[in-house]
Amino acid sequence: MPDRVPGTGAQTVVSMDFQSEEPDDMSYTLTVHWTIEPQTAPRPWRACSRCRGQRPFVCSGKTRLNANGRRLDAWLIYRCADCADTWNRPIFERKNVREVDPDTLHALQNNDLAWIRRTAFDVEDLRRSTDRIEEFPECRVRRRVRARPFEGCNRLEIVLAVAMATSMRADRLLAAELGVSRSRLARLAAMDRLILQPETRKNLQRSIRDGTRIMLDLSAEADRAEIIERAQEGAPSG
């Protein structure tokens, strides 16, 4: 019964709300980290003296380093895909040894395969030496779960780590890895249920970049469980 306030005849009513606060979006969000590993390095097209025409050249996995006093020249060696004729891609020329990064110098002296691979995928630097470059979008994706939802999952956050440049477009990556058509992805984006950050014009059609965050609201999708499972397939936690 309501309590009566002494001497007044008035009653006080105590109202108690037992409803809990609405959980925030993160309660329903699975966050996964995708590490993108491009599989095939860009191939420059150049005039091949043996083939007598334009041909694609493939990185040989070897470097060349010449010294002239204190000056160094360094190249990454490529071979014609058809006849194996060589082309030396300049890394630097006539550079004082003191100006060369010690790690770079060590990599050149030892044909460091990891350094060579990173350099072979550096398409921006490659453009200094050739006008025509053939790029390959094929990638390997390694997954790791960063945060699991507290409640039933209906939202997905994907954080991309892209160590080397790739021409893989965001919509093609998501379509291949989540099993969702590109037209459906475009519709979700138009409804603001698919958001890429940082936001750029036509970002679904742009090549993926390191640090890109993809937010996908699947609350209205009947197959959300299957999509979420594909996003984390084979991924360890942590």
Image: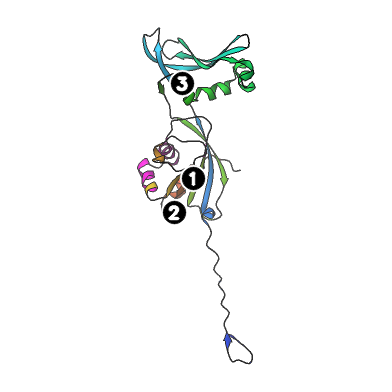
Q: Give the mark nearest the N terminus, 3 or 2.
A: 3
Residue 192 rendering spot, x and y as whole percentages: 41, 50
Q: Residue at x 44, y 20 (%)?
A: 43
- The residue tagged 2 is 219
- The residue tagged 1 is 229
Query: Residue 1: in sight, yes or no?
Result: no
- The residue tagged 3 is 128
C-alpha separation, residue under disc 3 versus residue under disc 2: 47 Å
Residue 8 rendering spot, x and y as whole percentages: 60, 91
Query: At label 2, which amino acid type do we have?
Result: Ser
Residue 174 magenta-highlighted? yes
Give the quarter of the figure containing the N terminus: bottom right
Query: At label 3, which amino acid type do we have?
Result: Arg
SS class, disc 3: loop
C-alpha separation, residue under disc 1 versus residue under disc 3: 43 Å
Query: At label 1, which amino acid type do we have?
Result: Glu
Q: Residue at x 49, y 45 (%)?
A: 229
Residue 118 rendering spot, x and y as whole percentages: 54, 25
Q: Give the mark nearest the N terminus, 1 or 3.
A: 3
Residue 158 magenta-highlighted? no
Residue 57 rendering spot, x and y as whole percentages: 44, 16
Part of the protein shown in magenta: 160-188
C-alpha separation, residue under disc 1 versus residue under disc 2: 15 Å
Q: Residue furthest top?
A: 50
